[in-house]
Structure formats: structure tokens, C-alpha cells
Amino acid sequence: MGEFWSRILQNYPYVFALALFAIGIYTILTHSNLFKKVIGINIMEGSIYILFIAAGNVRGGVAPILDMTDTTLTYVHPLPQALMLTGIVVSVSVTALSLALIMKLYRFYGTVDAKEIMRIRTEVRANGARIS
Amino acid sequence: MSVGVALVLASIVITTIGAIWVAAIPGEAKTQRHCIVVGAALVSAAMVWYLLYLGLGSGTYPAFRVGIASLSLDLTLDPLGLTYGILASTLWVFASIYSVGYMEHDTKQRQYFTFFLVSAGITLGIAFSGNLFTFYLFYELLTFATYPLVVHSGTKDALEAGRKYIRYSLVGASFILAAIVMLWTLTGGVLDFSSIPAALATASSGQLRILFFLFLIGFGVKAAIMPLHGWLPSAMVAPTPVSALLHAVAVVNAGVFGVLRTVYSVFGVDLVKSLSVRPILLVLCSVTIILGSLIALKQDVLKRRLAYSTISQLAYILLGAFILHPLALAGAMLHMIFHSTLKIVLFFAAGIVAEETGYLKVSELGGTGRILPVTMGSFGIISLGMIGMLPLSGFWSKYYLMRGSLAADAWILLVVLLLSGLLNALYFIPITVSAFTGTSDLKPRRKTKALLFMLVPTVIIAAFGVIFGLYPGLTLPLVDAVVAQFFSL
Amino acid sequence: MALAFRDNLAVLVVVALLSTAYIMPLLTKIRRFRVAEYFAVAMLGLALSGGIYLAREILLHGTFTYAVGGWPAPWGIELSLDAVSGFFLITIGVVATPIMLYASVDLIKEVGSRSRAAWFLTLFLLLVAALCGLAVTGDLFNIYVMVEVATIASCAIVAARNDATSVEATFKYLMLATIGSGFVLLGIGFLFVLTGNLNMNFIAQELSMSWQKYPTALWVCLSFFMVGFGVKSALFPLHVWLPDAHSTAIAPSSAMLSSLAIKGYIIALLKVFYVAVGAKIITRLPITDILTLLGMVAIIAGALFALAQDELKRRLAFSTISQVGYIFLGIGLGNIHGLTGTFMHILSHATTKALLFLAAGAMIKHTGKSRISEMAGVGAAMPVTVGAFAVGSLSMIGIPLFSGFVSKWQLLLGSLANGNYLAVLVLVGGSLLAAAYLLPVLRMAFFERPLQKPVVANVSYVQLAALLFLVVVIISVGVVPDGVLQLASEAATALLGLEVLP
């Protein structure tokens, strides 16, 4: 048991990342406020950045900018960092798209609450009309 | 490509071309459409007859094969398939002439005749398929091609009947598909009728029994074995030529033909014997024979009575097949031919009565013989054949079935056959008697062209029923060939 | 020369589509809208011929790789072209081209305005480009990027109609799809931590040596992938977004999403499971059993849900859930017939469902009736369209002579090869249920007597041509499947790592 806990402690960034991931998903699924859902997405994606960066990290390493004069330097793995830049771009575009959709939904329904939208929709459908 | 192969293909293709042609010409061109329909059926039938001539003359049968990936489309002639092919394609000609008269005032003629011809080609495809995949393909297509004919009138009843028909058929076809896949894994990919029995030799009898019953249930739906017969009586809402041709000849015999193929081509006589499933099968058929007749007795709607009679008579053919004796198989083949020719006349007559008088029920038929003497006369004579009276063809098939039962030491079947004959007499003879002795206030009507179109085929086929009765030897070359195909004598 | 052309073609297909996508709004500004649409159709046609050429090359000369930007793996992104890529490229081309053709007829009217229509073209082509990218890529992170592009593009084309219900469906879709992406990225992260690589071939090498050291971690990582791609490809309990999204979108969007978009994620899943992790490892983990089970549940449950729908497009959307079950069942079976069946079903469902959605779109648009129970007499008003729908239905049910039968047959053989009789039962039952939910549409349209006088509907010849193209594909794959079947079984063989069969 002791060994298990020490391994967990050593790899605390991973644990942290997974916990954040769970929090993110929980936020998306349980909150009915559309903005909170978007925040949840960002928390979730942030956790994955942590995971990747931690995976590429080397204790005591420096930023991977090649220094020809000093051959003793250890660098952190540059690949995950590059990838996460892409990941951030992706997450920004997803966020932008969702915010745009929220704007549209607000225009259609006058609310940003998923439950409210559901209620309005079923009411309108029951009346047989179309939402314009 | 030999002449035979070309003819096998052409007999199927010509009806398909005819169907497309019928669908393409405008709805008003009635005469043209009728000519195409009858012409296509006639040419196709002529080709099949020529194939019979070729086959019986030389004893060799052409085969046509196109590989479709690991499956193959395979058309082969053999005596069994030829019998069914001859039967279907010939009666198709008469049924299409009859349809011309019967559908005279119908507004959806184009749809009717298109699917009528498509079904003809598909039926020939079933007859000539040389492997199980091809058989399954055409068998499945037949369901879809005949569905529009069943629901033709578009009434609630018709749609309900169509729904029932398609449900039964598709479930049945699924059993066949499952059986084919199982067979495929058992034989390592052999589906050819000619080579399946040898490839099955290594399978365990437990697996073979499962396989056999999968096939039996699958084909049993179309062959209307009780308790899988539910669709047939309700399908009687279809126009009469459809009931006559499809529900007394083509579709139901496709099921019977499937069972024959299963027993004789897939498993082979010896293998079926070794499975010791015969008692179950014979009991199943006997029950269907007796129950079918009993229920027929209680039906008042003429077409429904005929439908239950069909269910009972089809079980005769299956009984003959399951006895697994050369004489019984001969009886089964004869009964397949004779029952079809006789039953189609009965349906045609019922259709004429319905068209001319509007009467559909047996209890209303009193006196109809006075105004439709030829129709009801044919009905009366042919129903005697159905019962199995001597100068008519129906006698001979029952005679062979009985001899087969005796030869196979199954004398109890004799009782079944005789009892059913008695029941047949009970539900057929009163119809004729009341038609000619009963009174009615019907006035004879002027004979129309439509009536003539219906009457001529009826009388011609009825004449065949008598001729076959007087000269049963006419059919023997074909029947002998079938028996010789499956029994080494 | 020929080799250089071939190698570059792989990346060219994707790049050409991407750049066409971005010039679309510009093109519609300076030329007539029609021109832009036909240009898009032409580009998709070119992509199709490129796909066919690549597939032929792959069949003749075996697989090959292309290092993007001249950086070899593991430093650069590697495109790896095998039979899987060839097969999926052909599927994309064959389906996307007629959909675009169909859309070109009344796109502006459907989406509301000219500029929106221009952006629709962009997004459509982006989606196709991303799917092509998924087909050719050999790099895990590249898969993630392509998956994201595909997700965003498909979300946006659901919202193209710009009404309340479709925007709401889009939002739901986007949320769940993003959760899916999160899981996928997490899975990629795990694989990276375990192996230190993102190139799938290198991961495979690394894992084959060391996977026994951490089976649990691998298992967790694979279940992340399963959940992630499962959400995106609507594997049964994770399908909640699909019915809304696919039924509220305009017909070409629905067709595109149901037929191709979800298949892209399945191809990605196949690559991760069978290329990166490898058949040897996958089949030893319980994950394949779970996929088989989920597939079977999806087939039955999706079909039962479909039966309960009266709205035609919703019924088709639930049918997709059922059909995706077939594909996952094949993946789970993990033998040559199962995977061949998976590939054949990817093609056959793509063509069939595209046909059904497009035909349904035309039926709904011209008669104004979206419910099956109102469709009496539609068959008489538009016989060719409903006839095409009938062909699609028969193929979906799996009647011989139509493409659906070919895949069903392979899946049946695969199930029996594994001794999985339950799967046989489910496959056969699934077909019966498909008959139960599709044939009533035809009965209604063709055979029920209409209550009012039937409307006269003139479907444009271009749309009919698109439908007939799909009909021809479905029937020719059903009648002569040899070529595609060979490609599919080659793809399956490649995934299983078996010797190529003679």
C-alpha cells in the first residue's frame, strides 16, 4: 500500500489532471446554464494540457531551445508542448463556436438555461407552432 | 454458351424485359400492354418447354454460372426444377390471359401487370437455381415482387393481409438465411445442390437436425405447413388471378419446392433417413392435411375454403416427399402438377362467379350454375378431381402416394389420405350440387369480352385435368426423371 | 515520376479539398453561385478518382507512407496509405459527390441566404477534407486534429438551417462531441505516456514489446478511446445527440453526417485499435467482447427506437444507430470476416443511408409532410424518388442483389467463425426489424389510398441524378462486389496483420 501511495505522489500531476477532467465533465453534464457548460469544456481540456505537459516534463530540464554552447543541459520533451499549442487552438475554436451558438439560442429562446429551453420547446411543440 | 444456357437465361430475362416495357408504356395503352404481358409469358413458357425437350431428349442439362465474390449466381436445369418451371410458366400464360379479362376495369393495371411479369421471371429463377444462394435470392425477391399484387386493391383488409404476408415471409426467409450461413460453415463454402450432400458428410447429426429444421421452418412458411399457414387465407383478398396463380401455384409451390430441395438436394435421401426425423415430419403433414380439410369445411367464403384446401393439399406433396420412397416421390411430383392445374381452375371459376354475380360466399352460390353453366360445370368436374375420383388426374397422384405409403410400411398414412379425401368430398360436392339445383333470382347476363378472356383459360386447363386423368402416362417421363435423379434404382 | 505523383496524391487530396473549402466564399462573390457549387462537385469527383487511383495502387503495390513536409517519422507527421485508407477514400468520394450534387439544386433556399450557402459549401468541403485526412493519416495527434475539424464542421452544418431546433440540436451535439474529443485526447495522452510516441507504427512496435508491463493502463486508455469515439459515432448508450442533430439538419447535412461523418470516427477507432495497438493485443483484452456486446445491443435497441418514430427523418436517424451497431459488432468480432463485414458495411451503410436521407428530404420538401403516417400517395406523386427510397430500404434490410446483403453476409460468417450464435440471431433479427421500420414507409407511400388529392411534385433532374447515382452504386456493389470486397478484405487483413491472401 505504501508503494502505491508513493507512486501516486510521484505522479501527482496525472492525478491532478484526471481529477480536473472529471470536474470538467461533471460541470458540462450537470449544469443547465449553457455558459457553465462551456466553462466545463475548458476545464476538461485544460486538464488534458496538464497531462501532456507533465508527460513531456523532465525534472530539472530547461525549455527546449537548443543551446550549442552547453551540452550538459537536459531539455524537456518539446513535442507535447507543440501539440498542446494545437490543442489550445482547437479548444478556442470549440469555445467560439459554442458561444456563437449560445448567442443564437438566446435570440431564439430568450434564455441561456438548458432546462428553460427544453420547457419552452415542449410547450411550443404542444401548441403545434414553430419556433421562429 | 450453349442453346440451353441461353434459353435458361432468356426465359427469365424476357419476362423482366416485358415487365419494364409494361411499366414504361402509358397507362391508357391497354391493348398494347395486354399483348406484351401475354406475349412475354407465352415466349417464356415456350422456352421452358423447349428446355424440357432438350433435357429429356439428351439427359444432359445446361448450367450457367456467374461468380459473385465468394457466392455465385448459378442457374442449372435439373428434372425437379424443370417440373416446377414448366408448371409455373405454363400456368402463367393462362393466368395472364385470365388477368386481361379480370382486370378489365381496374385503374392500376400498369402496376398489376408489371409485378405480375416480374414475379414470373423470379419464379423461373427459383426453379432453375443451381445453388442455395441463388435460390434464397429469388425466394426473397419473390416476396417483394408479389407483395404489390397482394395489396393491389389498397383496402384496409388488403394492406393488413399484405403486412401479414410480408411478416411471415421475411421471418421465414431469415430462417433460411441462418440455415445457409450454418451450411456454409459446415461445408466450408459449398452451396451447390449437386455437391452439398457429400460435403455435409462430416457434420454431426445434432447440427444436421438443427440445420434441417431451420430450412423446414423457413420454407414451411411459403409451403403453408401448419402452424405457419396464417398468411395464406388472409392473402385471399388479392385479385383472383393472383390468388389462383400465386397462392395455389407459384408462391406456395416455391415453398414446397424449397422443402423438396432441402430433403433431396441439400441433405439427400440417405442423410435424412439417418437423421430419424421422418416420424415428426409425417405427423406434421398428416395434421396439416386433416386440419386443413376440417377448417375448409367450416369456411363460407369460397376463396378461403379453397385456401384451406390448398394448405391441406400442399401437405400431400410434402407427405410424399417425406416418405422418402421412390413411389411416394413420384406421387408428390404428380400431386404438385395435378393439384396446381386443378386448383387454378377452381380459383378461376370462383373469380368468374365473383365478377359476374358479385357472390363470394358458398351459401350464396345456389343457382349460379344456371347462369354460368360452363364455369360451374368446370368447377364441379375439377372438384371431383380434387377429391380423387377416378377419371380425373387427382386420382393418380393419390394412388401413387398410397402405394408409396404402403411400400414404406406406413399404412396409417393411408387412413389419413382416405379420410382427407372424404373431407374433400364433403366441402366440394355441396357447392356444385347447390349451384345446379338451388334457386336464385339471378338473370343471365350478356356475355362480355372480359368473360370470354376468363372463361377460355379456365376451360382449357380444366380439359388438361381430364386429359391427365385419362392419360397419366403423359407426365411420367418428367416424373421418372425426377425420381431417377434422387433415387438410384 | 509515377511514384512521386502517387505519393503526393495522398496529401494532395486533403490539401486540394481544404483549399477549395476556403476559396468557396470568395468564388461565390466573383462568380455565379452555381459555378461555385459545380466547382465543389468537380473537386469531390476528383477526390473520388484520386481515391480510386490510390486504392488501385495500394492493391497492386502494397502500402506506402508519405512524410509530410519531408520530415520522416517519428519527428514529422506520417501519412500511411494502406487498404483501409483506399477503401475509406473511395467511400467518401462515392457518397460525398452525389450529396453535394443534390445540395447544389436549392442550397440557397434551404439555408436561407447566399452568404450562408457559401459558408455551407466551405464547411461541407472542410468536413470531407477532414474525413480524407482521417483516412490517410498515420499519426495519432493528426487524428485528433482531423477529428476536431470534422466535429466542428459537422456541428456547423447541422446548424445551417438556422432555426431554433437545429441550433439547439447543434449545441447538444457540440457539448457531447467535445466530451468525446476530451476522452480521445486523454487516450492519446495515455498512449504517449506509455510509449513516448505518436506515430501509430512506432506505438505498435513499442507496445508489442512492453504492453504486458501495464495491461491495466492500456485497458483504461483503450476504454477512453472507446468512449470518445463511441460518443462521436453514436454507439448505443452514447447516441443521445444523434437523433436530434441528424433529423433537424437539412437533407444534405443529415445525409453527410449519418453516412460519412460518423464513419470517419469509426475509421479512426479502427486505426487506433488495430494499427496503433495491434490485433494481437486487442483481441486479448476484454475490449473486443465489450464492443461485440454493445454492437448487438445497439442493433436491437436502435431498431426498436426507430420503430417508435413517426417522423421519417427521426426514424432514419435511429436506424443509423442500429446500423452503427453492425459496424461495431464486426470490429468486436475481430476476425477476417467480421472486419471485412465492418468495412463493407461502412460503404454500404454510407451509400444506403445517404440515399435514404436524400430521398426522404425530397419527399418531405415536395409534399410538405414529414410524418410517415401522412405520406399516403407520395409514391404516386414522385415515383422515382420513392423508388430510390425503396432500393435503399431493401439494401438496408439486406436483400441479396443490394449492397447491404454483402456486408450482412460477411458479418454472419464472422459471427459463426467465432461460434457466436447470439450474434447470428441479432443480425438476422436486426434485418427483420429494419424491414419493420422501413417497409411501412413504402407501404404508406405506394399502397395506401391518399386522403387528399396527391400533390404533383417535380423533383429536379439533378437531384434525381444524384439519387440514381447512389442507386447504381448500391446495386452494382450488391451484384458484383468482387472489387470492393477484395479491397475490404485486404483492409481487414492489413488490420489483423495477417499474410495477404492470394
Image (spheres, rainbow, N blue to C red):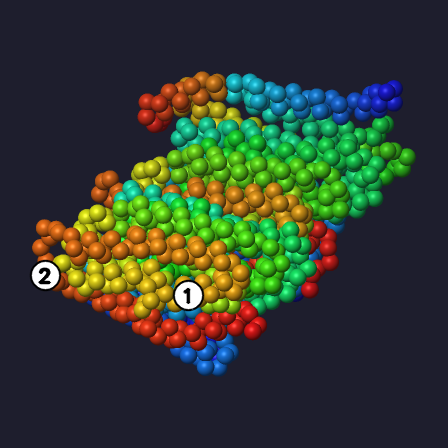
Q: Is residue C262 visible?
A: no
Instruction: Write down the residue under mark 1.
Output: B399
2 or 1: mark nearer the eye: 1
Decide which of B188, C336 is in the foreground and name it: B188
Residue under the image location 26 percent in, 47 percent down: B301
- Please give the name of the residue rendered at 43% of the width and 32% of the height, measured from the top-left corner: C166
User: In this image, B319 relative to C88: left or right?
Assistant: left
- At a point 52% along the width and 35% down the height, the residue shown is C301
Q: Amino acid at mark 1?
A: Tyr
C211 over B175 or under it: above or below: above
Residue drawn at (44%, 55%) of the image: B415
The x and y percentages for residue C308 are: 43, 34
Mark 2 or 1, nearer chain start = 1
Classify residue C490 by image quadrant: bottom right
Whether A6 is drawn above or below B362: the answer is: above
Label 1 marks which chain's residue?
B
Image quadrant occupied by the N terminus of chain C? bottom right
